[in-house]
Amino acid sequence: MAALRQTQSVENKHKLSNTLRNWLPILHSSLSDLNEAMSPFIESNPVVEVKCGYEESFESKIPKKIISGSVNNSRTEQIEALTIQSRSLFDVLDEQLEAPLFPTPISQKIASFVVENLDENGYYEGDSEEFCKNNSIDIAEFEKIRLRFAHVEPVGVGAKNLSESFLFQLDSSDISDEAYSFAIKVIEDLQNIYAYSDEKNFAEVMRVLGTFKNPPAIEYQEESSHVVPDLMIYFNDEEQIEVKLNDAYYPTIHIDANYGVEHEFISQKIKEAKSLVDALDMRKATLYKVGLMIVEYQYQFFTGGAIMPLTLKTLADEFGHNPSTISRAIANKYIACNRGIFAMKEFFTTAIDEDVSNAAIKEFVVSLVKQENRAKPLSDMKLLEFIQDKFKVQMVRRTIAKYRKQLNIAGSSERKKLYHLH
């Protein structure tokens, strides 16, 4: 009898592990990519038939209560929705801030400052003189270290402007020795590039320049795409808040249990198909529970207030998973409500301290920019100073740049141009 119980326990554990193995990639994928995430599990399974979720317009799948509100997809252009698997530009650069390019503590300190002061395009816009003054570093030594970014991937990042970025990229290009010096001349005079069209190596230089990244961080910039929300949160006719799964987009799995062939292989495939169904149900249950938690902790937001400080650890503790698993689970997931479409991760703001969230920081940034001197817009470093002074917190400049980008606020130089035009 004990042996039988042990056998059943092993079988149940095996079934659960199969379901969990299927569940993680299904949970981590966005709703629009769910069919693709499931394909490895169904391609070699003859007993499974999958019907894709609806492909009608977005509006046909959400409650009228939300449609009558302020839902619009332009909001999605302002939110950060990179998956955890996609490394950010700063992740890639941080891995390279060591030997052989930056072997000493001072060179690493300079390189870190350069990375922290990159704008969204990958250009360096830090105050080099102030940094050197505060750290007793010669400005020539600083520039010597910064120019090593010509050998950092992605090539071109860390340059001060487009011409310098092209010079960085030129050194790693396939241009001929004959055309190299001419290319430098052209790059240093890009505004008059076609004045050199009669030169011997012009065609080769144009071909090479056409392969350069402009801006240098272009491959790490977020792309705006059609967003399919996993959840809808809205007030019903009784003015009670509801959490609703976007079931219409979920694929339907049909299992042919009477396949017509009695074979151990078919039996195994039926078991695998059932574990896939279980995994899909687990995804729904998990995200629904996340939605309920968001309503519980962020109820004030849905009634017109601000997003409150709430860490991923709170959610992770509730589920019994570590925060990294939860971070992947909510990446590329969206919620539609009467205030718009929001990335799920926005509701789990990082609590900078017990009373301050990054949502409060963002609101302060907006107020500063609204009141700034249009002849001399505030740089990210100046915004950082104001924030640290007001909230008594320590932050880095690139965090401010990230917040500014999420708020759809241009950099100080771009804002100055826009103010001039208006």
Image (cartoon, rainbow, N blue to C red):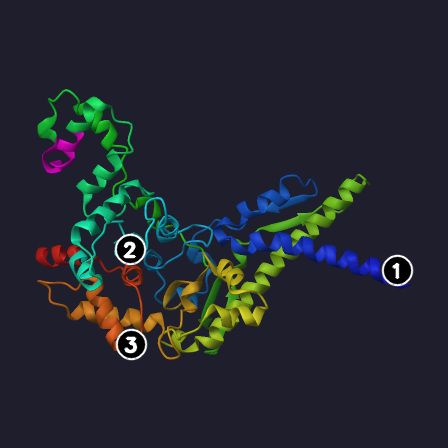
Residue at numbered disc 1: 3
The magenta span reads 183-193
Towards the viewer: 331 or 266: 331
Give x and y (percent) for residue 267.
78, 45
Q: Give the residue at the far top of this rendering.
A: 200
Q: How far is the residue under mark 1 from the one under mark 3?
A: 63 Å
Residue at the (30%, 40%) spot, across then down: 151
Query: In front: 324, or 64?
Result: 324
Q: CA distance from mark 2 to mark 1?
A: 65 Å
Residue 192 included in the magenta stretch of the image:
yes
Between tags 2 and 1, which lies in front?
2
Secondary-structure class at tag 3 = helix
Quarter residue 41 falls in: top right
Identify the residue position indicated by label 2 in the image: 106
Main secondary-structure element of the magenta-colored stretch: helix
| Above/below status of 250 relative to 317 | above
Label 3: few (<14), some (14–19) or many (≥20) C-alpha neighbours in 10 Å: some
What residue did someone put label 3 on? Answer: 391
Q: Is residue 300 above or below residue 137?
A: below
- Quarter of the picture containing the C terminus is bottom left
**Which amino acid type is shown beneath numbered disc 3?**
Phe
